Image (cartoon, rainbow, N blue to C red):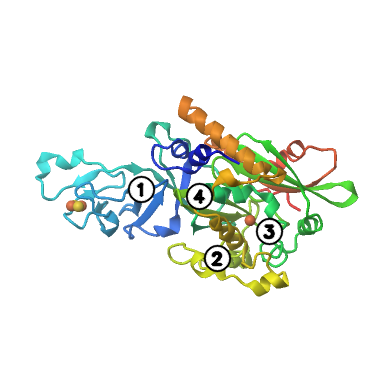
């Protein structure tokens, strides 16, 4: 349970809010690179952390993320003409480059230098792993480029999608570290989804519905360990990674690609659920890629605006028959829709003053405390928050069988770090 002030503190990320300031210390996914497929292609509206921005790719292939609105009289530059190394407002022809600098005001004499004095707000936009990343904090504090493994492996080994979620970022992220719901909500899909089925670990999952959870701090965030009984008195551990503020990585199953999320606030009542799948040691097979593109696993079928096909407006295509027959636990089909349907049902910003938390919510509780602590230290003293340092990003989830007397953090230490070209530790 949180007090109202704490809930507001964690969920508000607009300009000038403490959590908003902290989010602006990180590189965040802003668009899929395929949204700006070629030079001079149409610009794309982007809203992140409650700021309305416009992304474009100019004549020379440079990416820009600038204020959506023209400095002259506020027209949306989404209507702009992307030509000759800049974006020209269609109203009176003012033109901007990728840094937001105004480079032409046709009505004014060029010698007056008037346009030099006009500059729109802008943020860097870089391509890495098929994703365009932005950093929205002060220029002198820009951290080194992100080094997440899913965005560092060759393109044929990784797949990333995004979808609109109608809820605050925090309740979406909390679903990513709440391992205890998997035995219930997703129980029907473990043995049917092509990106989950057939793993040995699934048996342990389905045979032991009362996992024991241990949560420990890691440099960048938390490790959430879920322990289930395996053979001969040994334990099957599933270890989830959370790296501050909004990265989660699900433990692998068998040889399936490994998946995870980034939860990026659009505004306080909506977020982007970024979802990735990758293999560090091999290409994704044609079958795997086709399944990912169809929206299976943790991905979802979406429309051209990345809005999910099963959504609030159609009751997430609820199938009471499938629920009754036990094919799905909640009646909603697909891992992602099972999660977002319930998270959206809590309301856009869940009222955490009314919760009744239990021991299996430990990961959620510790993540909130770490967020509040780091946010306070960042805002009061400028302390760099966990997860900004690329070393904190070189982590992996793991699923392992360990002897009963071993601490998972120590015993699985190597498995929890990235190793180029080497597969995840997975059961
Ligand atoms: S409003 Fe953009 S040029 Fe006038
Ligand atoms: Fe889930």
- The residue wearing badge 1 is 65
Q: Position of residue 118 (x, y in %)?
A: 21, 41
Q: Earlier in the sequence, mark 3 or mark 1?
A: 1
Distance from label 4 to label 2 (Cα)? 30 Å
> Do residues under tags 2 and 1 come within 8 Å of each other at their CB atoms?
no
Q: Earlier in the sequence, mark 3 or mark 2?
A: 3
- The residue wearing badge 3 is 256
Q: Is residue 261 left or right of residue 138?
A: right
Nearer-the-camera pick, 320 or 407: 320
| Placement of 231 over or under 294, stated as above or below | above
Distance from label 2 to label 1 (Cα)? 27 Å
- The residue wearing badge 2 is 293
Q: Which mark is residue 349?
A: 4
- Residue pictured at 33% horizontal, 43% vertical: 122
Foreground: disc 4 or disc 2: 4
Any atom of ligand 1 within 8 Å of the CB at mark 1? no
Circle 1 packing at 10 Å, graded few (<14), some (14-19), many (20+), is many
- Residue pictured at 43% horizontal, 35% vertical: 142
Distance from label 3 to label 2 (Cα)? 15 Å
Foreground: disc 4 or disc 1: 4
Circle 3 packing at 10 Å, graded few (<14), some (14-19), many (20+), is many
- Residue pictured at 51% horizontal, 65% vertical: 311
């Amino acid at each position: 349970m949180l007090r109202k002030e704490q809930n507001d503190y964690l969920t508000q990320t607009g300009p000038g809010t403490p959590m908003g300031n902290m989010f602006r210390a990180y590189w965040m996914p802003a668009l899929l690179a395929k949204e700006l497929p070629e030079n001079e292609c149409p610009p794309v509206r982007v809203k992140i952390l409650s700021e309305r921005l416009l992304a474009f790719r100019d004549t020379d292939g440079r990416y820009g993320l600038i204020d959506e609105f023209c400095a002259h009289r506020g027209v949306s530059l989404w209507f702009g003409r992307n030509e000759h190394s800049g974006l020209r407002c269609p109203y009176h022809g003012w033109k901007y480059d990728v840094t937001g600098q105004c480079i032409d005001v046709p009505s004014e004499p060029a010698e007056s230098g008037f346009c030099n004095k006009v500059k729109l707000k802008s943020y860097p936009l870089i391509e890495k792993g098929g994703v365009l990343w932005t950093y929205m904090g002060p220029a002198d504090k820009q951290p080194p480029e992100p080094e997440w493994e899913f965005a560092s492996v060759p393109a044929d080994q990784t797949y990333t999608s995004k979808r609109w979620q109608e809820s605050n970022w925090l309740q979406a992220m909390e679903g990513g570290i709440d391992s205890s719901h998997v035995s219930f909500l997703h129980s029907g899909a473990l043995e049917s989804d092509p990106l989950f089925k057939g793993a040995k670990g699934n048996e342990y999952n389905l045979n032991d519905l009362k996992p024991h959870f241990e949560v420990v701090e890691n440099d960048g965030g938390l490790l959430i360990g879920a322990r289930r009984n395996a053979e001969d008195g040994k334990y099957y551990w599933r270890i989830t990674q959370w790296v501050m503020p909004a990265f989660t990585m699900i433990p692998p199953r068998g040889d399936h690609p490994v998946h995870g999320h980034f939860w990026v606030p659009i505004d306080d009542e909506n977020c982007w659920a970024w979802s990735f799948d990758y293999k560090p040691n091999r290409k994704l097979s044609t079958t795997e890629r086709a399944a990912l593109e169809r929206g299976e696993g943790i991905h979802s079928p979406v429309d051209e605006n990345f809005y999910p096909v099963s959504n609030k407006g159609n009751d997430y295509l609820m199938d009471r028959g499938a629920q009754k027959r036990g094919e799905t636990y909640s009646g909603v089909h697909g891992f992602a829709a099972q999660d977002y349907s319930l998270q959206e049902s809590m309301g856009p910003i869940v009222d955490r003053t009314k919760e009744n938390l239990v021991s299996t919510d430990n990961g959620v509780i510790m993540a909130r405390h770490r967020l509040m602590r780091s946010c306070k230290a960042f805002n009061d003293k400028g302390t760099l928050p966990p997860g900004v340092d690329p070393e904190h990003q070189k982590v992996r989830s793991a699923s392992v069988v360990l002897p009963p007397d071993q601490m998972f953090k120590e015993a699985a230490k190597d498995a929890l770090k990235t190793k180029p070209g080497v597969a995840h530790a997975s059961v």
